Image (cartoon, rainbow, N blue to C red):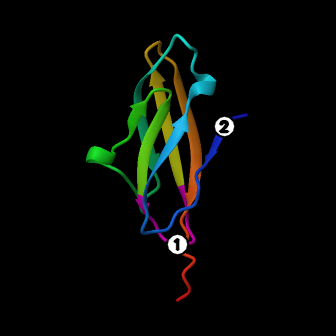
Amino acid sequence: MPDYLTLDAQHPSDDLDHAVRFTKWLPSDDTIASCAVSVSAGLNLGTSSKAPLIAGPNIVFWLSGGESGQEYYVQVTAETSQGRRKIVDGAILILDPTPL
């Protein structure tokens, strides 16, 4: 069964970092060599100093924006120095509980 990532909901005004741990699929003699993160249109993926990065067995990325009440697709890909590739799909819900 494929793994599915559920990220904690965030407010449309938030600009938050998220991490996906790849330890479960990463043998001790292998390391993550490159990463990619894709998100649905309307959700903002960090760039520059907030661009996706490799932090040991984790891939860290920043998300912001989105419309309250909407769920957005997120896909995180890790490629290792030994040629393995692991893709994790998931979603994040954007919520603004402030009454109008």
What's the residue at 41%, 36% (across, down)?
Answer: 36
Residue that protrudes farthest toward the bottom in the picture: 100
> What residue sits right under mark 1 in the picture?
68
What's the residue at 49%, 33% (across, down)?
Answer: 58
Secondary structure of the residue carrying tag 1 is: loop
In reply to whether residue 16 is colored magenta, the answer given is no
What's the residue at 48%, 70% (across, down)?
Answer: 67
- Looking at the image, residue 80 sits to the left or right of residue 99; the answer is left
Q: Percent x, y for residue 20? A: 53, 38
What's the residue at 43%, 15% (across, down)?
Answer: 81
Q: Quadrant of the N terminus?
A: top right
Q: Percent x, y for residue 51? A: 33, 44
Indicate the quadrant where residue 41 lies: bottom left
77 vs 63, nearest the viewer: 63
In the picture, the disc for residue 3 is 2
Q: Percent x, y for residue 43? A: 43, 59
